[in-house]
Amino acid sequence: MVQMIMPKMGESVAEATILKWLKKEGDKIEADEPVLEIATDKVDSEIPAPASGILSKRLFAEGQVVKVGEVIALITAENEKAESIPVAAPVVTASPSSNGKTEKPVTETVAATPAHTEPTVITSSSGRFYSPLVRNIAKQEGIGIAELESIKGSGMNDRVTKQDLLKHLEQRVKPAYQPAPSVPVAAPSVPSTAPSSPAISVSGHVEIIEMDRMRKLIADHMVMSKHTSAHVTSFVEVDVTNMVKWRDKVKNDFEKREKEKITFTPIFIEAVIKAIKDFPMINVSVDGTKIIIKKDINIGMAAALPTGNLIVPVIKKADYLNLTGLTKMVNDLANRARNNKLKPEEIQDGTFTLTNVGTFGNVMGTPIINQPQVAILATGAIRKKPAVIETPQGDTIGIRHMMFLSLSYDHRVVDGALGGSFLRRVADYLEQFDVNRII
């Protein structure tokens, strides 16, 4: 018997909602075949079978919320009798003897009954399914079932997604002032030493809106990061004239050949990868007093969503990709992020993050570290500026393409020498870009 587990779906995501079972009990399934659809606040995804066999038991109903790590189904081999399927999952623990030696393992029975006994599903008279997240947003905004029925859904089987509902709310006619519904929201847990938030006056001409759940998670994660890491930010100005001229020269031919646009982001990522190889202690995490050095280089790229929220898809083993491969990965992840098509595993296990604040015309930023990483690089806008050019004949003034890089790092494990040296090395790789490079 094989237990099917709700997989980890990214940092700060602890649970998921079962949208639809694709297989019934008794169905034959193959390894890696989709068994059910799940939804989190960040992505909708299909969960594949971990092994081939018969789906003997579904432990949760559609619409139920399941914690990461919980058993959601049982799979038996085709030649295994149904009667032999245990009702409980055995957990084996070692019992130490009085002399310090480990005795025979003791089997402890744990009930496999799901914690959520009542499915949190809402359907209309037409049988249309609404996820718990959509239902909660509708409740907070005072949207009744009749109004929900009128919303065109972009999900599977015309299902209304969070994005559909938020778009509907933007287009919905509201009165000049609409008080926020009285919905209790759990306050994020912070250390007892943290100062309490000042009271906010709501008198005058104001509008009150409630954070969506994704925004609450982002807020909690950012506050947690500031309380966890001692943030320091270093800056450097970079002459990227060669890089800009090279991209201008190759972008049209590259797009014709690869059917992809080449942006500056994969070039930045390539420079970061090279610098991480030179300074591997930037690619670490902290566990108490232990430093965990990550051998894989997994680059997260912060992406703004149409809703205004933020998500960080991750390029796994980025150092294995050349510039063409990085370009394709960047474009693919960015496009699917904007369309809510990322898979759960594509937003987890990052070891270093890049955020391009220059996209919004900002010249520099002081980004917050994406825990449990220890550093994040912000790339500013590229602008033409007069600059001193050193030549064998002496110094001269010229028009150059200049930009700022800013690195926020965790001062618990990254000192100024390491953080500053790493940042300078990224700048060096960008400044020394080969304008004659062939891609």
Image: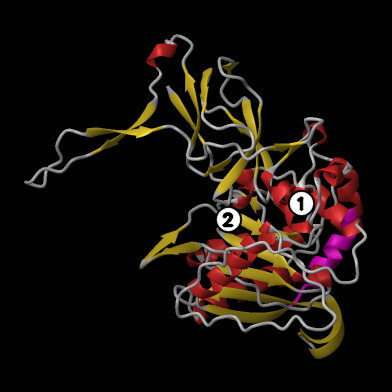
What secondary structure predominates along the stretch shown in magenta? helix
| 97 relative to 46 in the view: left or right | left
Please say whether residue 289 is one of the residues in the magenta stretch.
Answer: no
Q: The residue under label 2 is which amino acid type?
A: Gly
**Nearer the observer, 175 or 20:** 175
Question: Can residue 304 be seen?
Answer: yes
Q: CA distance from mark 2 to mark 1?
A: 34 Å
Q: Is residue 410 above or below residue 295?
A: below
Q: Which residues are magenta?
A: 238-251
| Foreground: disc 2 or disc 1 | 1
Q: What colour scheme does the image use?
A: secondary structure
**Nearer the observer, 75 or 367:** 75
Task: Name the image quarter holding the N terminus.
Answer: top left
Crowding near the residue tagged with mark 1, few <14, some 14–19, many ≥20 C-alpha atoms within 10 Å: some
Crowding near the residue tagged with mark 2, few <14, some 14–19, many ≥20 C-alpha atoms within 10 Å: many
Which residue, given by chain and number where applicable, does mark 1 sit on?
Answer: 138
Q: The residue under label 1 is which amino acid type?
A: Ala
Q: Quadrant of residue 386?
A: bottom right
From the top left corner, tell me how far across and down residue 297 is, in percent. 56, 55
> Which residue is at a point 60% across and 44% down the rendered structure image?
16
Which residue, given by chain and number where applicable, does mark 2 sit on?
Answer: 350
The secondary element bearing badge 2 is classed as loop
